[in-house]
Amino acid sequence: MYAPSSKVWSAVAIRPVLRMGDPRLWERARDVVDFDTPALRGLLSDMEDTMRHFEGVGLAAPQIGVGLRVVIFGFEASKRYPDAESVPRTVLINPTLTALSEETQEGWEGCLSVPGLRGVVSRWQQLRYQGFDQFGRPIDRTVNGFHARVVQHECDHLDGVLYPMRMTDFRRFGFTDVLFPQLDSNAE
Ligand code: NI
């Protein structure tokens, strides 16, 4: 009889993503106190599975109804953002963001909690972010461009902010398939 390795099968757990209008998305998330716990591992595993399933470039714990200051992001290539440079896969917990200059940059954003839509948002161009990984090891990076944009977008979720709340020009807000008909039809 074929004996499988001792590796435990873990089921893929795709969690429903809360959509704009759900009051849980407006709450301020709480700091993580205990690192490297089974509960935190389970949360991160669910977040990874959910982000991959919906082809997101980032996901914040409140988007799956967990009010903790945990975000994940990163990709090699994205169907949702085919022109974006890659961003290293990152688990970022209890983050602190510091703008490194006054310079801002406009760019298109979407959100798994605002499906089917895109809008232009102004973000800090140069950013330092600090926080912890899942083991409680410190993270301290200085980034710019799309990487900086993704971090600002995801960390906004921890303070109950969705990207439309940052918009100033609603003529540059619309349905993805109307704005970008050339994008993969599965990409929102
Ligand atoms: Ni989002």
Image: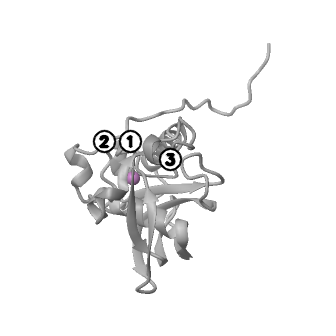
Q: CA distance from mark 2 to mark 1?
A: 8 Å
Where in the figure is residue 133, as x and y percent of width and height?
Answer: 51, 63
Earlier along the polypeptide chain: callout 2 or callout 1? Answer: 2
Total number of numbered discs in the rendering? 3
Q: Is residue 77 above or below residue 95?
A: above
Q: Nearer the viewer, residue 18 or 114?
A: 114
Mark 1 highlights which residue?
115
Label 3 Cα neighbours within 10 Å, binned few <14 / some 14-19 / many ≥20: few
| Helix, strand or loop status at disc 1 | loop
Amino acid of disc 3: Phe
Q: Quadrant of residue 27?
A: bottom left
Mark 3 highlights which residue?
180
Please tell me whether mark 3 or mark 2 is closer to you in this view. Answer: 3
Q: Nearer the viewer, residue 188 or 76?
A: 188
Q: Is residue 93 above or below residue 82?
A: below
Where in the figure is residue 151, as x and y percent of width and height?
Answer: 46, 65
Amino acid of disc 2: Arg
Mark 2 highlights which residue?
19
Q: Are marks 2 and 1 in contact (CB under 8 Å)?
A: yes
- Residue located farthest toward the top when viewing the structure as drawn: 1
